[in-house]
Amino acid sequence: MDSASQGVAPRTPAVEGLTEVEEEELRAELAKVEEEIVTLRQVLAAKERHCGELKRRLGLSPLGELKQNLSRSWHDVQVSTAYKKTQETLSQAGQKTSAALSTMGSAISRKLGDMRNSATFKSFEDRVGTIKSKVVGSRENGSDNLPSSPGSGDQPLPDHAPF
């Protein structure tokens, strides 16, 4: 084969600092290395075909290999320092969030309890109970009418309602 078909550039004037003899030696070495690369690619392709045949005969599928590689990679991630630090940080954050939500829930429950025990809520609860008993009582008596005025109940309504 000639040098043009091997990928070697056609002869040019000697590169500065190189004699014609040195340039020829380098070109010959380049052609030899390129030829070795072609040979290695052919050998690698043959080895890959042989490897594929062996895997096929052993029943190893690309999907099985992928699963194995992913499993191995996931294990490597789990044992990494970065993963362990991240896992620890997220665990601590979860614990702190849980504690904060628990404290907030307790505070809300306490406030609702305080509100339920307040005089305003008791007054409102009594009024609702009175209206309910009048409505239920009037239905039992055959009348669906509500009292004629809101102020006609047992207790007068305050001028400024809290709600």
Image (tube, rainbow, N blue to C red):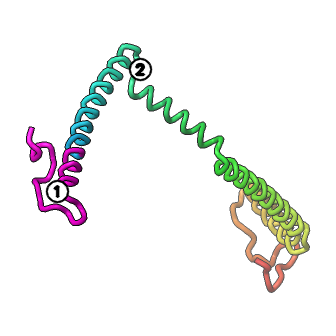
Above or below for 159 versus 89? below
Identified at 11% across, 59% down, the residue is: 12
Foreground residue among 24 and 109: 24
First-in-chain label (2 vs 1)? 1
Which residue does the numbered mark 1 point to in the structure image?
20
Report crowding for label 1: few under 14, some 14 to 19, many 20 or more residues within 10 A (C-alpha).
Answer: few
Q: What residue type is labelled 2?
A: Leu
The CA span between labels 2 and 1 is 56 Å
The N terminus - image quarter: top left
142 or 89, which is in the foreground?
89
Q: Quick one: SS at disc 1?
A: helix
Instruction: Give the image location of residue 57, x and y in percent.
Output: 36, 13
Q: What stretch is highlighted in magenta?
A: 1-29
Residue 71's place in the image compared with 46, above or below, is below
Q: Which quadrant holds residue 109?
A: bottom right
| Other-residue count near label 2 (Cα within 10 Å), few / some / many at <14 / 14–19 / ≥20 | few
Task: From the top left corner, tell me how far across and down residue 15 is, in percent.
Answer: 20, 63
Q: Which quadrant would the C terminus be assigned to in this image?
A: bottom right
Main SS, magenta region, reads loop
As helix, strand or loop, the secondary structure at mark 2 comes to: loop
Q: Residue visible at 59% across and 39% down? A: 76
- What residue would you read off at disc 2? 60
Q: Quadrant of residue 5?
A: top left
